[in-house]
Image: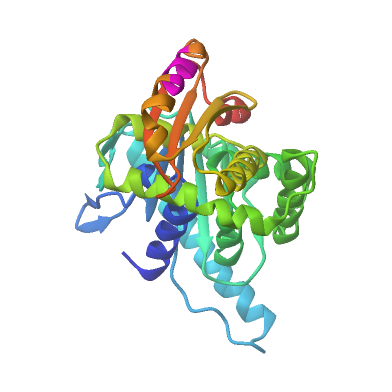
Amino acid sequence: MNSNQEKVLNIISQFSFGAPFIFAPDEYKKGNATREPADLVYACNNTIFLIYAKQKNKPKKGLASEIIFNRRKTLIEDNIGQLEGWLREWKNGRNIIGKNEFGSFDISFGEYENVIGLGIINYTEDFTIFHKELATKLNLKHCLSISNDSFDKLFRAGFSLLDLGILIKSITLMSKDNIIPVNKLIDNYFSSSMKRSSKEKIDINILKETDIYFNNLKSQINVNKKSKELQGMSEILNDLKLYETIKIKYQISILSEKFKKDIRQWQIVMIPLEKYKIIIGFSAWQNWHVIIDHFIKTMKTYENDDGLIGMLYELNTLCPMVNLCLERKNKSKIEILLK
């Protein structure tokens, strides 16, 4: 795995709930050559990203724009060539095989409804190229090349798999141009998500303070790699819009401030989202015997809803000590978006 692959893998794992669903696929033999289906594969919610992360040093300052353009063009053509070659193999019956720490993958062609080709280029600072004609020719939902810097910015801003899909689809619908600078669009999307998440103005520093709650949940997912419950939670959290994630964090910040004043209290709140419901409970250990019964009863109240997550946090450790997830019955939001 080259350093650019590792960087992409780490960004997705660190800044989203994507760790269970991303892996480096096994190589395969084609004649005397050894080839890869992609550098990385991200498969979640009936959507699969074939990721090509070519490694090349960034151009030095002052390098002629024509040289930069030609080098970028070569990297993109290499990615497209690898994508086209793999799609032929895949359609002819060769599966994507691989594994990560959470499990193994054996993905046949047509198993995932939405296939997106994504090239991440370690070159130039702010560009995204949409290969619209190629996507149509290859029967892909989308095909694009994005700079490493812009991809990094996406996930550091808290984008989910769904947010990425929204951004891709909205740009292709709004713009006739194939080459688009996206960093400003990312900033605008983040700003509008902040405004949409609450009627009150939210201090971004408060959100950073609540990151520990999500990070502790990610740690539990990483430790309990075989837990289907936690992987189900990851699928739903990958299917939230950014404003919904901010809404959850803001509610957590309100509750945590309340309990700083008196940890003898306990509380359970239900946060309604567009498609899902999130139930969060807070309590110190001394009230555990009381809150656990109320938490289970609250979960049962909404057990017929599609996609329900429950997280019960212990106030001293800030860790979710109980995690519950009811299986989603209908299609994810990203599946509906990309139809």
Using the image, determine if residue 167 lies above or below residue 6: above
Q: Is residue 113 magenta?
A: no
Q: Quadrant of the N terminus?
A: bottom left
Q: Position of residue 192 (x, y in %)?
A: 77, 46
The number of numbered badges drawn on the structure is 0
In the rendered image, which quarter is residue 247 located in? Answer: top right
Magenta-colored stretch includes residue 296: yes
Instruction: Depth check: give the residue in front, 153 or 90.
Output: 153
Percent from the top left, x then y, of residue 34? 24, 57
Q: Is residue 162 above or below residue 332?
A: below
The answer to whether one can see residue 45 in this image is: no
Front residue (pair 267, 176)? 267
Residue 30 in view? yes
Look at 54% across and 31% down and name the residue there.
Answer: 267
**Image quadrant where one finds the C terminus:** top right
**277 on left or right of 46:** right
Residue 76 horizontal/vertical position (percent): 53, 61
Q: Residue at x 28, y 55 (%)?
A: 35
Extent of the magenta region: 294-300
Between residue 62 and residue 31, name the one nearer to us: 62
Position of residue 229 measured from the top left corner of the image (x, y, whole percent): 34, 29
- Residue name at image x 39 percent, y 27 percent: 324
Residue farthest to the bottom? 62
Left or right of 89 in this view: 171: right
**Toward which corner of the image does residue 256 lie, by quadrant?**
top right
Please give left or right for residue 323 compared with residue 263 in the image: left
- Is residue 133 depicted above or below 334 in this figure? below
Q: Is residue 5 above or below residue 255?
A: below
Report the colour scheme.
rainbow
Q: Main secondary structure of the magenta part?
A: helix
